[in-house]
Every structure is written in structure tokens, then in C-alpha cells.
Image (cartoon, coloured by chain):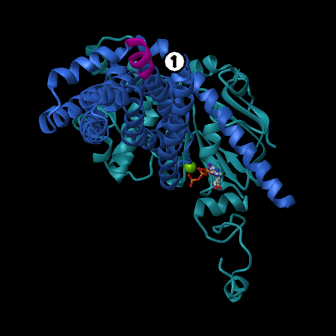
Amino acid sequence: MDNSVSSQDSIVSVRNLSFSRGNKKIFDDISLDFQRGKITAIMGPSGTGKTTLLKLIGGQLFPENGSITVDGEDVHKLRRTELYELRKRLGMLFQSGALLTDMNVFDNVAFPLREHTHLPESMIRSLVLMKLQAVGLRGARTLMPNELSGGMARRVALARAIALDPMMILYDEPFTGQDPISMGVLVHLIKSLNNILGLTSIIVSHDVHDTSAIADYIYVLSGGKIVGQGTPQEIQQSDSEWVQQFMTGAADGPVHFHYPAKDYVDDLMSTGKRY
Amino acid sequence: MIQIIQNLGKSTRTSFTKLGRATYFLFQTISGTFGILLRPRLLLNQLYSVGVLSFLIITISGLFVGMVLGLQGYYTLSDFGAEETLGVMVAASLVRELGPVVSALLFAGRAGSALTAEIGLMKATEQLSGMEMMAVDPIKRIITPRFLAGLISMPLLAGLFSAVGIVGGQIIGSGLLGVDQGVYWSQMQASIDFHDDIINGVIKSIVFGFVASWIALFEGYDAIPTSEGVSRATTRTVVNSAFSILGLDFILTALMFGDN
Ligand SMILES: Nc1ncnc2c1ncn2[C@@H]1O[C@H](COP(=O)(O)OP(=O)(O)OP(=O)(O)O)[C@@H](O)[C@H]1O
Ligand SMILES: [Mg+2]
């Protein structure tokens, strides 16, 4: 394992992490570091466990082995109240958005502010409108979540994730479902949040092109292991077959497009079986 | 044979672990009470959707049950020439038994199933884990106010049910069948005891409200987060609530009215 990255200035460090779902090993002894103030991307084929990794970092899942330190605290050794204090400093953008369906857009973005601060409503209003303006949805404040498109819902969720001005944001697939225009705005937004406010970002993405454009460092995960890491340039020039396949999107290579299965021809020929 | 015993052991173990989870869930729910009392708005919203929205079904059912009691009671009592005690019979059946039990069953069907579906869907759409990541405890923020609302509404709904039922009995008894109106009310007033009948009925309905809300919320929270899982959980809420309400009713009746 390349340990050139020192864990000194890293805000999140994952050490020797193993995690399984049933009999399936999702992570097999991996270690990663996320630098403070940088944008780090996690890439990898669908179903490798990128979302799972974010949930482990957020303390929603427990590792079988290994540890995860966030801002100097071992997430899985914290007491409940301490974990909640830590989470107030994290923003997480869920892959599904996870908006509260019984509230409109405005109240969704105001939710963390109302829960955790005692700000007057007028102040909350200004803050919410600022966050909504940043994601281009100030005009949609009275819509209910079921009236939003998938891409809009994700932008509202992003506005909510930055409502409390967290020190770090975990983005699960922020670009999926965005048209080129809002994609450009989002890329710019994530970048400027990082550079101007100095927060740290962890981005899970499939989108090789856009991620390379904003990430400072990239980890490529596959089959429970880290198959490549480095700056976008290093990754693009990497001679690792895994990484090359992922970057070029070839269906054949060390990463399999198919979920593990027996031989295709055999499978088709074995008639008489139900599944 | 071994297989049967193994299966029995396995299902006993799963139901015990479920009971354990449910108990832990209940403690967490109750421990959120203080926080909710500081934010009465959350409770008021839930009182509206859990309690007020059950008004109509409770009122209509109470009216019909009272009317049926009026009819049936009159035919039975008039065989003994005792139709002037119709008021007592209607009121005692309602206050002691039918009010708490039937309104609790209706509550489980109307409000309980809705609660399970709501919580289950919130879980399936990651709203609950989203809240956790925003450092908001979903049990304290979502479950506790609903639980308290169920606990408060149930005795009120049972009271409403009994009151409407008594009026229904009177409409049939004196309006249709000719029992003297004054006798209907005065006999009732003389024979229904505040402590033995009314308080015991209220205690029953508090217990039923507690159990029905607990089951509904836990089933939603524990549901498998898929559409099928939520639909099964909703069914379990109605079935388990009905069993628990009827079983507890027997036990409570035996304890309360056993020695009269
Ligand atoms: N609740 C669960 N129970 C069992 N297995 C699960 C569960 N959630 C996820 N998995 C499994 O864990 C693996 C990793 O899932 P995860 O959602 O982390 O993938 P991902 O990398 O985020 O994929 P995608 O890019 O498609 O979102 C998958 O193979 C999935 O089958
Ligand atoms: Mg994912």
C-alpha cells in the first residue's frame, strides 16, 4: 500500500477497514486518507461500496475491522451524543436526496437550522434563500419534494447539506441526473465552497471527466480493494489496467461489468431450472 | 421432528429479539418526551393527524354501536319488564367495554396503519438516515410526538365514542321504542359509578392507546425498507394491535371488575 500521504493533515483517515454484507466482502483491509481543505474523489464501478464507505465514515454502519478517524475522533468509539456533535459538522448529500416529503423545499433547507440553532425566523429565511440561490432553486422554494425532478431534488439536498456551513461535505453522486448547465454550476459550486470557505469535500462519482476536473486526489475502488490512487493526471496516466479500464469505460478488463455468475453459455443451456 | 424443534427454537429466538428491539425502541421513544414538551408545536401537529382525523370514524361508529345496543337491549330487557334500565345497560356496556375496545380497534385501523406506513416509507426513502446524518435523532423528532399524540388521543376518542353511543341508544330507546327519556338518563346517572366504571374505562383506553401506538410506530420503524416490507408491516400493525387490545382487555377486565 502506498502510504506516501501523511495522516498529519488528513481530516478523515480510514485504517485497515474491512466490511461485509452477508457473505460478500465489500471492503478488504483498505486504508485511505482525505486531506483537509481538498476535494477527494472516490470512483469505482457500481456496487463496489462507495455509498457504503460514506455511511461508514458517517458512523451509520460499523466496520468489522479497522478504524475510521474523522477530525481526530474515532467515529465508531464515540458515544451517541459525541457522534451527533461530530455529524453537525458534516454535511451529507444522499444519493437519493432523502428530502423530508412532508415539507416544502424551503422548510427542508431550513430543517437543520431550526433543529440546531435558535436563530430568528428572519435570519433563517435569509440563510435558506442564500443556499437556494447557490443551487439555482430560490424560485422553487414552495414546491413539495414530489413536485421536483430528480436533479432538482438533489440540488435541494445539496442546499440542505451546506445549510449549517459544515467543515466537510460528503457528496454521493452529485452530478447524476444534472443537465450540462446545472452540472457546470454544481462543479463550480463545489469548487468554490472548497476554495472560498475552506471546507473539505469527498465526492463519490462515476463521472470520470467532471471528477477529474475538480478533484485534487482520486481513489479508484474495485472488488473491495483500492486499485488506483493519485492526482487526476497520475490517474489518467496510470498504467494500471484496472484504472485504465475505468477511465476509458471498456466493458472487458479486470473489472467485470457483470455481477459474478457462472458461464453464460452453460447457464443458457441448463434448461429445466427455474432460476 | 428435530427439524420442527429447530424451527420452533429459531422462531422463538427471532420473536424474542424482536421483543427486545421493541422494548429498547419504547425506552428511546419515552426518553424523548421532555424534549417534545419544549416544542409543543410538533405534538399539536400530530394530535391533529392522529387524533382529530379519527373523529369522524369514531363518531359514526359510536352512534351506530349505541343504536344497536338500544335495540338489542330493549328487546332483551322488555322480556323482563325492565326496559327502564335500558340507559344503564347501554352506558355500562359502552363505558366499561365497547367504548375503549372498539375505539381502540378503529384507532389501530385508522391511525395505526397510517403511522406504520408513514414511518416505514420514511425509512425506505432514507429520510430517517438522512435525519441521523443531520444529527437529528429520528426517534425523538419523529416517533416521540406521534407516540404521545396516540397516548393522549385514545382516551379522548374512547370518551367521544361512549358519549355518542349513549346518545345513539337514547335516540332509539326513547325516540323510537318509547322508553321515558327522563328515566333513561336518571337510571343511568344513579347506577354508573364514576370510579368503578368511568375511571376503569379511561385506564383501559390509556393502556390500549399506549399499546396500539407502540406497535404501529415500532412496526414502521422496524419494517424492511421496501414497498413490500412496508405493506407487510402495515398488516402486522392491524393484526397485532387487535390481538393485543383484545387480550389486554380480558386481563384488565378480570383485574378491575373481578371482585364485584
Ligand atoms: N442493506 C443492504 N443489505 C445487503 N447488501 C447491501 C445493502 N446495501 C448495499 N448492499 C450491497 O453492498 C454493495 C455495495 O453497495 P453500495 O450501495 O455501497 O454500492 P455503490 O458503490 O454506492 O454503487 P452505486 O455506484 O451503484 O451507487 C452492493 O453489492 C450491494 O449489493
Ligand atoms: Mg451508491
Callout 1: CB less than 8 Å from ligand 1: no
Residue B144 seen anywhere in this rendered image of the structure: yes
What residue is at 55 percent from the left and 17 percent from the top?
B31
Please state which of residues B46 and A150 is positioned toward the viewer in this rendering: B46
Image location (x, y in percent) of residue A50: 62, 47
> Relative to residue A107, is residue A173 drawn left or right?
right
Image location (x, y in percent) of residue B4: 80, 58
Quarter placement of the C terminus of chain A:
bottom right
Please state which of residues A86 and A237 is positioned toward the viewer in this rendering: A86
Q: Which residue is mark 1?
A: B32
Residue B140 in magenta stretch: no
Please state which of residues B91 and A158 is positioned toward the viewer in this rendering: B91
| Mark 1 Cα-neighbour bin, 10 Å: few <14, some 14–19, many ≥20 | some
What residue is at 18 percent from the left and 37 percent from the top?
B172
Residue A225 seen anywhere in this rendered image of the structure: no
Q: Does B128 appear above or below A74?
A: below
Residue B196 in magenta stretch: yes
* Chain coloured cyan: A
Segment colored magenta: B194-201
What residue is at 70 percent from the left and 86 percent from the top?
A265
Image location (x, y in percent) of residue A22: 74, 52
Q: Quadrant of residue B148?
A: top left
* Chain coloured blue: B
What residue is at 73 percent from the left and 56 percent from the top?
A223
Q: Disc 1 on helix, strand or loop?
A: loop
Q: Amino acid at mark 1?
A: Gly
Q: Does A225 appear above or below B122?
A: below
Q: Main secondary structure of the magenta part?
A: helix
> Label 1 is found on which chain of the structure?
B
